[in-house]
Amino acid sequence: MKLIGRSTEKKYRIDFLFRPGLTLSAAECRKLVEEVRHVAATCFDPVPDYQLMRGTPEELNDKAVAVARRADGTLAGFCSCVLLPVEGVGDVLHLGLTCVHPDDRSAGLTHKLTRKVVVSYMVRHKPLGRKLWVSNCAAVLSSLGNVAQHFEAVYPAPMEDSRPWPEHFRIADAIDRLYRDKIFILDGATFDPETFVFRGSVRNTVFQKDRDDVQFHHRKPLLNDFYRDRMNFQDGDEVLQIGYTSALSPLKHTLKRLRKPREQRAAAPAQA
C-alpha cells in the first residue's frame, strides 16, 4: 500500500492517505474499505451508507484519511476527511468522520488522527501563511467544542471575536446546495443562515444524539451550553462550523495562552 505520510504514536502507527482511490490499487482499496467498515461497525449500528463505507471510486477519490494501526497491523481507528471544492475559496477540508475501536479509545487517537490529516494536508498543499478552510457539521458537543478551540475564526463559536466572514457564507452555501450527500445531511433538512444550524439534518439516524448524554459532552461547560442552546436534539439538528488553520496557527494559539494569564493578573484587584 502506497503511503503518503507515516508517523509512530507509541504502540500505534499512523498513516496518511491522500485521495486513496487515485493512489491505491483496486485490491488495496477493497481492503481499506473492509477495515474501515469493521471499525465503523463498533461505533454505529447500523453502519451509515456514506463516506468510505460505500466503497465507490467517487467516495475514495476525494478523501484525505489518517489510519491508526496496532503493532500487528490491524486497524484501530481512522479519520476520513472530505475535500470540498468551493468557488472563490478552493478546496475546503471537511473534518468528516472519525471512528476508534472501543479497545483503543483510551489512547487519544481521535485527536491524533485528526491532527495527522490536517497537518499532513497543510504540509503538502498549503504554502506557509496560506489558510486551509475547514468545516464541521455535528450534534456531538465535544466535537463542536474541540473545533471551536483549535481552529481560527470559527463561526459559530462562543469566542468574543467569532463572526461570519464572506468565506463562511460562501462555504456554508456550497455545502447546503452541493455537498449534503457527502456530509450525511438529509434532503429534508433546512439550513438556518442566522444560526448556522441544519434543522432536522440527522433525524432518526445513527448520528442523532441525546441532549443530556454526557459521553458526548465537552469538558468545558461554556462550550456545551453555547452549542446545546442552538440545537433541537429531538428534531436531529446539527451545527455547521466553518473556520481555518494555517502554518502560523500553532504560534498564535501559544501566544494567546501566554497572554491570557498576564491579562488576568493585570485585571486582578490590588492586595492591601
Image (tube, rainbow, N blue to C red):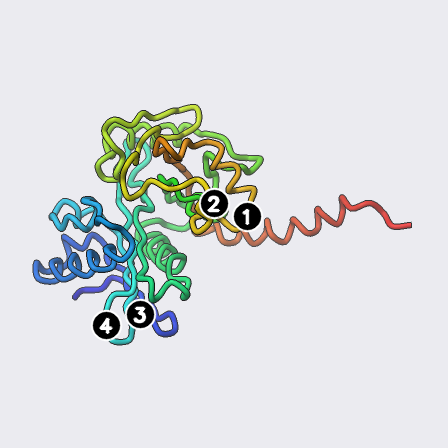
Packing grade of label 2 (10 A; few <14, some 14-19, many >=20) is many
- Picture coordinates of residue 203 (x, y %)? 30, 34
Residue drawn at x 33%, y 46% is: 95
Q: CA distance from mark 1 to mark 2?
A: 8 Å
Could you tell me which secondary element the residue under label 2 belongs to?
Answer: helix
Q: Identify residue for label 3.
A: 13
Q: Amino acid at mark 3?
A: Arg
Left or right of 253? Residue 20 is left
- Which residue is at 43% across, 48% downward? 216
Image quadrant of residue 159? top right
Question: Circle 1 is placed at which residue position?
Answer: 220
Mark 1 / mark 2, whichever is N-terminal: 2
Left or right: residue 85 versus residue 211 is left
Are circles 1 and 2 on residues that touch, CB within 8 Å?
A: yes
Q: Earlier in the sequence, mark 4 or mark 3?
A: 3
What residue is shown with label 2? 145
